Image (cartoon, grey):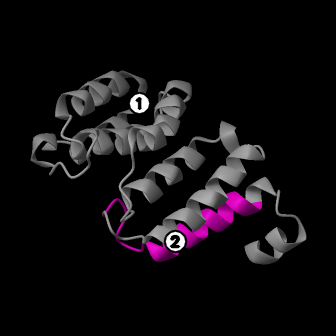
Amino acid sequence: MFELSLEEDEDQTRAHLWYGINQATQKLAGKFYRPGSLDKEETLSLSTHFFKAKQTGAGHLPRLYIWIGVVWLSSEVYPENRHMAVLENALATFPDSCGIATALALYYARCGRCEKAQALISNALPMLHASSREDLLADFSEIRSIEPIYRTD
């Protein structure tokens, strides 16, 4: 269905967004945020759909940025600071998004920048709903045990 919609008009915002979400969900079943779960081609394909959705009008949806983070943090291609700048800008726009804060904190922790990850979590907590606050704290209760795997030079 999404493919047909994209064939008819490749600038359709919702078609790109939902096609990307659908494909990412299928490809990552049970492997969200696990590095290496998406190969280079899958990462490029999914990122292309999400960025086309952004360009055609989905930039006001926090869900878009959450999925961009999911793709980058599940890829065999390690994200760089310039890739994650999209999420940093999104968090400034949507400070109450637990999903965006989670992706950025995980990225910082994987870079070995645990203090920055903890600062982000501390700054995000007051803006989150109680259930999101609990989820974020549970996700990062042992942040210092996250293995640094990304290079940041």
Give the position of the N terminus as an image quadrant.
bottom right
- Image coordinates of residue 135 in percent, x first then y, are 31, 44
- Image coordinates of residue 143 in percent, x first then y, are 16, 42
Q: Which mark is residue 28?
A: none
135 versus 22 height, above or below = above
Q: Which mark is residue 41?
A: 2
In the image, what residue type sits under mark 1?
A: Leu
| Residue to which mark 1 is pinned | 128
- Image coordinates of residue 26 in percent, x first then y, are 50, 76
Q: State whether the magenta stretch is mostly helix, strand or loop.
A: helix
Give the position of the C terminus as an image quadrant.
top left
The outermost residue toward the right is 8
Q: Is residue 15 left or right of residue 68?
A: right
- Image coordinates of residue 22 in percent, x first then y, are 59, 70
Q: Is residue 5 left or right of residue 93?
A: right
Q: Nearer the viewer, mark 1 or mark 2?
A: 2
Say which quarter of the image contains residue 111.
top left
Residue found 82% across the figure and 77% down from its top = 4
Q: Which residues are magenta?
A: 15-34
Residue found 46% across the figure and 68% down from its top = 40
The outermost residue toward the left is 145
Q: Please indicate, yes or no, whether residue 135 appears anywhere in the rendered image.
A: no
Residue 66 lies within the magenta run: no
142 versus 17 height, above or below = above
